[in-house]
Structures are given as structure tokens and as C-alpha cells.
Amino acid sequence: MTSRSPRKSLACMKYGFLVILFCAMLLPSYQRLESTGDNTYDISLNGTYVGSLDDPATADECLREARRRVNADSGELVLVSTELTYEGREEICGTVSDEKDVIDAMCAVLKRDARETMERAYTVKIGQYSINLASTDEVTELLQAALDKYQDDEGYTPVLGFDNNRELAVLTPTVYVEETGEEDDSLRGILNTNAQAGIASFLEEVFAAVEPAVEKDFDDYEQGITSMDFKDYIEVVECYLPASDITTLDAAIDEVTRDKATPTIYEVASGDTLSEISEKVNIPMDDIIAMNDSLQNEFSVLQIGQELTITIPKPKLAVSRIEQVYYEEDYEADIIYVDNDEWYTTDMKTLQEPSAGHHNVMAQITYVNDDQAGVEYLKEEVTYEAVAKIVERGTKIPPTYIKPISGGRLTSGFGRRRAPKAGASTYHKGVDWATATGTPVYASSGGVVAKAGWGRGYGYVVYINHPDGRQTRYGHLSRVLVSAGQSVSQGQRIALSGNTGVSTGPHLHFEILIGGSQVNPLNYLN
């Protein structure tokens, strides 16, 4: 049995204490944990273990730092879902992870689970339309392409600047024309576009006040484009978007500048006819009729203020410009209308035939896209005067015509046909509706009864003269309820249908006559 001296035992205890102290210095993550319930937490991010910490709040701070690093590394905004979970336990002595190691592990998980990167982009809003581009340079190129569609080498250029009237950071374009010369270039480096425009306007006012007014000659005017601008209000806003939502520059230029069919409204003005409207909007008359249910044919009556749907090709972004142009041409004087309150609007009479004049003109023409929006004569020399056309026209709204029976089946239309029976005409001068005998027959329009009684092949018949000079006829009746000379109103019951005269069965025969000749009634019924 070996005995140990008290001095050796004390030395061993000293060496043991030093070893423990040295280990504690080498292992800083080793902590003495108090027994107060859960004091160590295993941290998982999106189901992956990333380390152990003594406080869940520290894990939240580590996640925020990991997010910051991932976004900083990519240079863009990274979109990723995160689910941070904690599993607590109580330990008397244990180790926790270094925060740096936890952050590194979280970064690895975030990069692994990133759905897509949100890239810096710029949304261009043109009215209700919007498109996304990758940079302000591309926005400027898009706007330049819209201007270049209507200019050759005039040098009008868009510049983006902040809209001072908006609280948020919104860019809007201003269009200016490039100037030549060193002096102008140095000024542009100092002054913004608005300031230059203000100075130019001020100088023009000063010179106008001191210079005497002298009539310009044609050679004194500058020809070509004198100003350009965007007709639509444009907003450019910085944002972050997935790469899939950003349009390439070429596709954006095609989408914004290409002409596309766009429905618009044309309001009928005094004196308008379908042929004139067709010429104004450069659309065939048949196409205008097809676009509007209110138009039956080229003879349809137009009302002042009536709205017609007109489909016109135009781009998403409208560009306005002003051009000064010199030309020599024959011209027509404006038509002079003389209103006659006793005539219908369908009645017109030429009182004086026109004669063209000739003039030399320096004109200022305003365009929206390729459509002429206005003309102002800056200088005009008339070689010889035009003689105006003078037209007398009616102001009264003409009567309308309705179907003279309710229901019925159309059995014979207007025009050539095979004779239904011996003695019947092979050219049908009206339309037939098959209907039971005794069906009420109504006046298609108001007027005065010209004939009521027997009419040979018509059987019992009623003729009505109308204020617009037209006449309607109702044949093969079983009973007449009006008499000649009687005034009737539209929709008033005038007879009962039947099968009298040259007829193959119970029906109503209906005609409309204009100038004494039958026309197709179906073209005039409302």
C-alpha cells in the first residue's frame, strides 16, 4: 500500500485546477448553464439544423443578418420563404454554437431555398397600360423609339426627371431638341430643360416687346418639326420584380409603338354624312356600318350628337408634334348651310354651286401620331378666291317606321320571286308576314289615310301618306278600320289581316314607297 504525502496531494490539486482553467480558456463555447428550465435551443431553418443557442431572440437576429448577407451577395432582392423553429432542453453543462457559424449555416439554407431573385426594374405606366424594363437607359430607348417613329433627323430626345408634384419618387419624361454649338452644350450642362425653356420664353417676350412687328415672308419661316411631346402622361417607377416579369427592350418597343386596332367614339356633328365621316377617319363606309348596329345602310339617318364606334389603328403611346409646312394648292371654301325649319333633315337643296380657289400657304399642322389634329395658317396668299357651296337643309327630325304587326313569319321578301299562283307578280314589291286572319294591323308611321277599301289584287287595302313624302300600303286585309282622309298616329290600329285579293293564305302584305316607287321595307323599319 502506497501512501501519499500531504504536500504531493496539494500539488496534484493545483495541477488539476490549472488544467481545468486552461481548458475553459481554450473552449469559449463551453458554458455553465443555470438550471432554470429550457436553457439550450436547437435551431432549425426550413427544417435544417443550423446550430444551438441559449436564446431564441439571438436566432432571430442571426436570421436577419443572414438575409442581409444573401441579398448583398446577389446584388438584387432575393425572395425566399423562411420557417425558424426552436427545440428547447435543459442542460447543466453544455456547449452552444458560435453565432458566426449559425449565420453561415443560415445563409447556406437561404441560398438553397431561394425561389427566385427579385431584380431591380422600372415600370413604365402609359395611362392604364404598363410595361416593365430593366433600366432607365432602356426606358429612355423605348421613349426615343416612340419619337423616332415620327421624326427623321430633327434630334428630339426624351430626358427622365423627377416629377416635383409627386410625393413619391416618380420619373417623367421631358422632350427637348438637341442643339448644336459649344455654347449651347455648356448651357445644357448647367441648366435643366425646364430652366432653358423658361429662359427662351423670357427672351422671346423681351425681344417681342422691343422689336416692331414686321410681316414675315415665306422664307422667314422654319419648315419641319418645331416641337414634339408625348400625348399621354407617362410615369416611371423603380421597383423589384422577378426576371420573368421584365420585358426585353425589343419586345417593349414593338408592343408600345406598333399600331393596333383600337375602338374609339366618333360624335356626329352638324352636316356630317356617312361618306364624309368615312373620309375623315379613313375607314370604308361598309366597315363603319358593320361596327354600328344603329346603322342599316348608307342611307341611314344620322342625328347630331349620335355616337358611332370607329376602330382606328394606333399605338399604345401617342406622340404629338407640330410641323410648319409650305404648300400651294387648290382649296374649297366651307359649305354655307341655310336652315329650313319646314323641311326634314333628310331634305337638302343646293342653292349655289361651289368653285375652287387657289392659295399659297405656310401652315402649322398639329399631329397626334399620324392623324392631323389641327391646322393653323401662319401666312396665306390667295391667288384667286373660292366660291362657297350654299345648301338649304331641313331641321325637322323625319318620322320613323315600325313593323305593322306583332309577330308573324316572314314568308316572302322584296324583289324577284317565283309567282306563288296564277295572276300573282313575279316581282314582289313588298314583304309578306304569314299570320292568322284577324291579327291587328298598325300604322307603321303617322300620317293621313289616302285610300281605304278594295284594291283589286290587294284585296282590302289601306294606303297612308306620311309627312316625309313616303307612302305605306297594307294589303289582303279582312277588315278596314279607318277611312280616307283620316289622320292616324304611329302604332294606331288601322285594319285586321286577312286573305283577300290574289292571296295564297292568311298574311299581311306591306309596302313602302319613296317618290312613288316601292323600296325594300326591311331597310327602313326600326
Image (tube, rainbow, N blue to C red):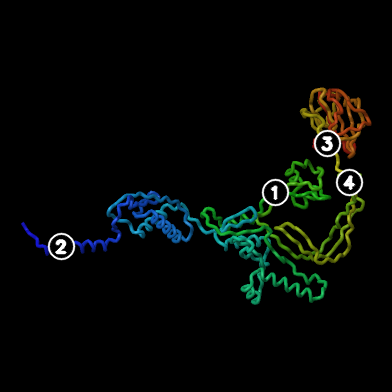
Quarter residue 335 falls in: bottom right
| Secondary structure found at label 1 | strand
| Secondary structure found at label 4 | strand
453 vs 292, left or right, is: right
Q: CA distance from mark 3 to mark 2?
A: 126 Å
Which residue is rendered at x = 30% and y = 59% of the image? 29
According to the picture, the residue beneath numbered tag 1 turns out to be 263
- Name the amino acid type tagged 3: Tyr
Quadrant for the N terminus, please.
bottom left
The tag on residue 12 is: 2
- Name the amino acid type tagged 2: Cys
Quadrant for the C terminus, please.
top right
Q: CA distance from mark 1 to mark 3?
A: 30 Å
Point out residue 377 in the picture as x, y percentages from the top left corner: 80, 64
Point out residue 176 in the picture as x, y percentages from the top left corner: 66, 67
Question: Can residue 457 be spotted in the picture?
Answer: no
According to the picture, the residue beneath numbered tag 4 turns out to be 394
According to the picture, the residue beneath numbered tag 3 turns out to be 401
283 or 311: which is nearer to us? 311
503 vs 254, left or right, is: right
Question: Which comes before the other along the chain, label 3 or label 4?
Answer: 4
Mark in the foreground, 4 or 2: 2
Point out residue 287 in the picture as x, y percentages from the top left corner: 74, 45
- Name the amino acid type tagged 1: Pro
Query: In this picture, is 192 found above or below 74?
Result: below
Mark in the foreground, 2 or 1: 2
Question: Which comes before the other along the chain, label 3 or label 2?
Answer: 2
Q: CA distance from mark 3 to mark 4?
A: 19 Å
Question: Which comes before the other along the chain, label 4 or label 1?
Answer: 1
Q: CA distance from mark 4 to mark 2?
A: 130 Å
